[in-house]
């Protein structure tokens, strides 16, 4: 039996006007509507995470600048100078790397932070009703703060190299949404698994590290042999990174439609799987967390 207020506005009414509904399965029936009713909780959690993200750190928000900048330098040295891999089109190698790092850091931040989000909010999960999917979703919004900082860095690098984006940049918001969708599916799955099996907190850093090298962050997709392209294109970040480079590096980058189609299909499957498994195990979170 589920005990909950009918909706959020009732909490602001007088006791005589409030309606308390006792109905088995009601939370399941109105789950997606409750997501909208609890939008203020979503905003509060997101704002809280933003406020404490770099609290009590030595350099604070500068971490959002240092990490991608150092990673760009390392990848440019290893893949561009030592391995002498080609860039894409006429873009300088550092720009190609940083354009790929934008969606990668968005993905890795969402996956890493959301996986432990339910465990970190044990008291909240165990005491009150609300759609639990709000918690990892709020983490995704926080990751957009770092993404915005990195995007400003990208603009500064393009100005430094004298590289002007073309009209393709108008499609960048669509690929940002695509990157968010590609991140949320695995994040929901890992969040639910981490509640039941705490070993996943050790597995996730390995997944992130491994994914960095099998995604075209430090190199161009053109360097991948054709015999491996089908399996390679199943990585949802391949299409996301290719789309970001097409948007930011202009006409020098070809638009790869088959690559994008594979990534969209994989993203849709992972998003469905993540939501399905999260919803299937959500009712047990309060008992096992």
Image (spheres, rainbow, N blue to C red):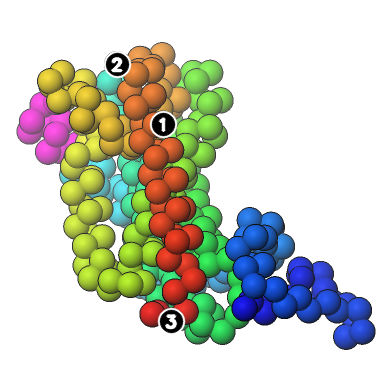
Is tag 1's residue or tag 3's residue first in the polypeptide sequence? 1
Give the magenta part as a residue range. 75-87
- Where on the picture, by quarter, is residue 222? top left
| Relative vertical location of residue 286 with respect to residue 54 in this rendering, above or below | below
**Residue drawn where x is 86% and y is 79% of the image:** 18
Task: Please name which of the two marks, 1 or 3, marks the residue nearer to the observer.
Answer: 3
How would you rate the neighbour count of disc 3 (Cα within 10 Å): few for under 14, some for 14-19, many for 20 or more? Answer: few
Q: Report the residue marked by disc 3.
A: 287
- C-alpha gap between disc 2 and disc 3: 54 Å
Label 1 environment density (alpha carbons within 10 Å; few <14, some 14–19, many ≥20): many
Disc 2 versus disc 3: nearer the observer: 3
To which quarter of the image does residue 109 belong?
bottom left
Seen in the picture, residue 104 relative to 219 is either above or below; the reply is below
Residue 245 image point, x, y percent:
37, 27
Q: Which mark is residue 264?
A: 1
The x and y percentages for residue 287 are 43, 81
- Mark 2–mark 1 distance (CA, rounded to whole Å): 24 Å
- For the C terminus, give its image quadrant: bottom left
Residue 98: image location, x then y, percent? 33, 37
Q: Is residue 189 left or right of residue 16?
A: left
Q: Secondary structure at mark 2?
A: loop
Residue 81: in magenta span: yes
């Amino acid at each position: 039996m589920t005990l909950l207020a009918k909706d959020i506005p009732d909490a602001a009414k007088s006791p005589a006007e409030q309606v308390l509904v006792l109905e088995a399965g009601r939370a399941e029936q109105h789950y997606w509507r409750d997501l909208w009713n609890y939008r203020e909780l979503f905003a509060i959690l997101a704002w809280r995470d933003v406020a404490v993200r770099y609290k009590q750190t030595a350099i604070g928000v500068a971490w959002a600048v240092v990490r991608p900048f150092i990673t760009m330098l390392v990848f440019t040295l290893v893949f561009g100078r030592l391995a002498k891999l080609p860039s894409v089109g006429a873009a300088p190698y550092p720009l190609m790397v940083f354009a790929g790092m934008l969606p990668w850091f968005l993905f890795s931040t969402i996956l890493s932070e959301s996986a432990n989000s339910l465990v970190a909010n044990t008291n909240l999960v165990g005491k009150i009703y609300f759609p639990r999917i709000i918690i990892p979703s709020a983490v995704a919004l926080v990751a957009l703060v770092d993404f915005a900082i990195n995007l400003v860095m990208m603009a500064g690098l393009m100005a430094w190299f004298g590289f002007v984006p073309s009209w393709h940049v108008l499609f960048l918001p669509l690929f940002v949404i695509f990157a968010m969708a590609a991140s949320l599916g695995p994040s929901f799955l890992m969040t639910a698994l981490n509640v039941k099996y705490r070993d996943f907190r050790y597995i996730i850093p390995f997944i992130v590290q491994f994914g960095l090298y099998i995604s075209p962050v430090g190199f161009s997709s053109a360097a991948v042999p054709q015999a491996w392209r089908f399996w390679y294109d199943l990585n949802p970040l391949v299409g996301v990174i290719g789309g970001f480079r097409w948007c930011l590096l202009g006409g020098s980058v070809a638009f790869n439609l088959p690559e994008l189609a594979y990534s969209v299909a994989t993203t849709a499957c992972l998003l469905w799987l993540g939501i399905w498994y999260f919803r299937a195990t959500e009712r047990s979170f309060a008992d096992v967390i």
